[in-house]
Structure formats: structure tokens, C-alpha cells
Amino acid sequence: MNKKVYIESYGCQMNFSDSEIVASILAKDGYTAVEKAEDADLVLLNTCSIRDKAEQTVLNRIDSLRNLKGANKQLKVGVLGCMAERMREDLLVKKKLVDLVVGPDAYRTLPALLDEVEGGQKAVNVLLSREETYAEIEPVRLGSNGVTAFVTIMRGCDNMCAFCVVPFTRGRERSRDPYTIVEECRQLVAQGYKEVTLLGQNVDSYRWNVDSRGEVKDAALPVTDFADLLAMVAEIAPTLRVRYSTSHPKDMTDKVLEVMARYPNICKYIHLPVQSGSSAVLARMNRGYDRAWYLDRIAAIRRYMPDAAISTDLISGFCGETEEEHNETISLMTEVGYDMAYMFKYSERPKTLAARKYPDDVPDEVKGRRLAQIIDLQIKQAGERNQRHVGQVQEVLVEGVSKRSAEHMFGRNTHNAVVIVPSMFHGAELEAGDYVMARILSATGGSLKGEVVEVKKGRSAMADL
Ligand code: 5AD
Ligand code: SF4
């Protein structure tokens, strides 16, 4: 009964984290995770619907599995995640080689669905849930470096941004029991992990009411909010770095910033998606804040953590975006000075508020030109911002061997910038999981180059403070 599953993940970190939950559920059903589709009895694609391009990539990938299925008639193919939710039976009908379609809240039913598939039927479960958080499931870490791990703290999203498909594919927002989160992080520490990233679509609206472990939620009891949770995780061990994603500008509180500033092991990096610099566009996007509010949040971050790195998401060519509105995005970028940005052309998604209410009226070449302008500015600004690290001695958590050179290791500083250092220090090899102090010598493109001045084997230098 030793069956083999290959899981391929697309989209956000949440999806990669979900794949580890799926691997855990399937492990109990006799499946071992393998690293190549060719070796598997079951191939699962954990998919993303955020933009049309993401979906097209997966649809092409499904077609490319035809050869594998031809070579191995027993091979089963399943589609998980956001596309399963959005395209449902369409996938089963139009893509003949798909045997199984399972949405993000239905992974516990995978073993039963696979039984149906074994019996020669196609199987589907795309029910969304108000409660499912997979709270007690211990993920099987896939493709892990043994140093950094994702921990999901909440699921779904209630925000209804006009452009976004996520509320339709991942359902209502719900938070996970904080005690199970802390327990999962403790286990990771015991296994030698050095960094956790707490994941949620909108971490700032994390809420949990409990009196003690396992008790039912009760509205009358004190609330654990995201700031409390962050502190609980940071307290586990000073040698455990804590990151999180994603904040929402409308909900980000000073209390979270205060906790971040207080704990040296909470990384000084915030991903705060702005989407547009124009208040009129933000209103059409239904984001719940305007430009002034967003800039006030940036000022608050700088007040608590003057040196924190900030990244963002930007969309070019949203419905009705004028040249002036686009220029407001450019001026906001100049005003903030992002360390990093994820930049996209607007892609209309069926069912969303924008698809129902506004025409997708910015021509593709205009979206493209505006995006190129945004990207050019970001590259220039990131290059300049990266220079501020040069000359500093920074704590770097080593994650593995550099992709470009076997004589170098790569890691990250607290600001989430990649730092490349020589792998030998005083005749000894660095290892993944080492904390080192590195003097930053230069900043090139997306990464920093440094020289190691001290190795703190597995100990956070910050723990000495
Ligand atoms: N078109 C383009 N970009 C989108 N995003 C979300 N929905 C869309 C869409 N329909 C971007 C947003 C979000 C990030 C995860 O993806 O910037 O923050
Ligand atoms: Fe893609 Fe959004 Fe689903 Fe993540 S939640 S997989 S980004 S559609």
C-alpha cells in the first residue's frame, strides 16, 4: 500500500503551506510525497486563480501531463486550491485527464475522494467552510531547507476588494486556535527550525476568544488579537525568527508595531500592499483606506522601527484608471521608497465586484506601459535603498548554498534582503541554520554581498541583548 504523491504548488505562500497539510492528510492514508511527477501514482496541482495568467499556466500544465498519463494508465491527476473552487466541474468536463477536484476547505475528505477515484469515478468536493482551519494537523514539510517554515494562522478573507477573487475561492475569514499555532512553532524549534512565517490573507484581523487550551470560543472572553499572537510566538525562543504576511493597511494597528519593535527576534520587515496611490482608485477598489491613511500607517512604521524594510503590491490599469491617477501611484512610490514590490497588470476576475460594476477599460498596452514605468522606478529605488546596508554588520540566518556559486551560502537579514557570504569561515564550513554576523560589502540588484565576521552556531546574536 505504499502509494506515491507528487504535489506541485502555484500562487501564494498560503498555497505552499496548504500543500504541506495535504501531504500530512495523505501520509495517514499511506502516501509518501515524492519530488518528481514521473515517480508518482497521484499528481496534485495546488492552483491559483489570482490572475488569468496564473490559471492559464495551470491549464497548460494539465495538458502537459497527458504524456505521463499515457505512459502510466494508473496515474491519477487532481486539481486542488483556488482554481478547483472557481472552475469546479468545468475542469472535470473539459479536462478529461483530471480525476479529482478539491477546494481549499475540503482536504480532509481527500482519502474518501481518492477511494471514489480508485473505483473508476471522478470525484469533487469544493464545499467552503466557516470553521475549517486544519488546526491540529501537523504539516509534512515539503522541499524544506530545515531552517524556515510557513505556519498558517487564519484562512479565507472577508474584505471584498473589488479586484480580488480570493473571497470566492477561499471563503469566509476564520482564525486558528492560537495554542495550536504556538504548539506547531514549538515543534519546529525542536526539529531545529530557526524561522517561522505566520500566514494569513489579512493577519491584522486575526481574532480568537478562549479561556484555556481547547475551550470553545466565547464572545464574552478576552480576545487574542494578532499583536498578542505575535508576542506569544516570539516568546517561544529568542533564537526563533518570526515573520508574517500579509498586513492590511486599513487594519494594521500600532499595537502590532509596538510588539514588533519590542522583540528583537521579530523581523523588521512589513509587507503592506497599497495597490494604488490614488484615493479615487482605492475607493473603486473598495480597499477601505485612502492615500492619506496609508501614508499615516507608513509614518507609524517608521516611528516604531525607523530602519524597517517595507514592501508592497501594486496594480496598474485598474478600471477607469486615468493618467493622473497612475501618476499618483508613481508619486506615492517616491514618497514611501519601497525596499521591494510585487507589481501586476490588472486582470479582471469573474464574479468580483469590479467585474460586475466597472468595465475593464484601460487598454492592455496602457496597462503595460504604466506597469513598465512602475517597475523601472521600483528597480531604481530598491537599488538605492539597498545601499543603506553597505558597511553595516548584520545578523544573517543562513538558509543554504547559493544558487550561483558552491563556494557561497545565502541567507537573509532581518529586512528580508538576501545576503550572500563565503561558505568557509576560519577554516570551517557554514551550515544552513547558522546565525552569522556579516559585514555588508556591496549591494547588487536584488541581493547583498557580505563577509562573515562571527559565527553564532544556531544561536541568535540578538539573544545576547
Ligand atoms: N489583477 C491583478 N492583480 C491582482 N492582485 C489580486 N487580484 C488581482 C487582479 N485581479 C494582486 C494584488 C494582491 C496580490 C496578491 O495580487 O496586488 O495584493
Ligand atoms: Fe492565488 Fe489568492 Fe488563491 Fe493564493 S489565495 S492561491 S494568491 S488566488
Image (cartoon, helix red, strand yellow):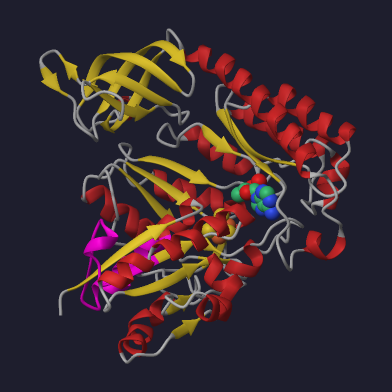
Relative to 401, does residue 109 appear above or below in the rendering? below
Magenta segment includes 37? yes
Toward the viewer: 308 or 128? Answer: 128
In this rendering, would 434 be left or right of 303? left
Q: Residue at x 25, y 45 (%)?
A: 146
Magenta segment includes 460? no
- Whether residue 146 is visible here, answered yes or no, is yes
Count of numbered tags: 0
Q: Residue at x 39, y 51 (%)?
A: 150
In this rendering, would 210 be left or right of 188? right
Estimate the x, y position of residue 120 in percent, counting from the top left. 34, 90
For the N terminus, the image quarter is: bottom left
Per the rendered image, the range of residues in magenta is 18-44
For the C terminus, the image quarter is: top left
Estimate the x, y position of residue 393 in percent, counting from the top left. 37, 13
Q: Quadrant of ligand 2?
A: bottom right
Toward the viewer: 220 or 307? Answer: 307
Q: Residue at x 43, y 29 (%)?
A: 414
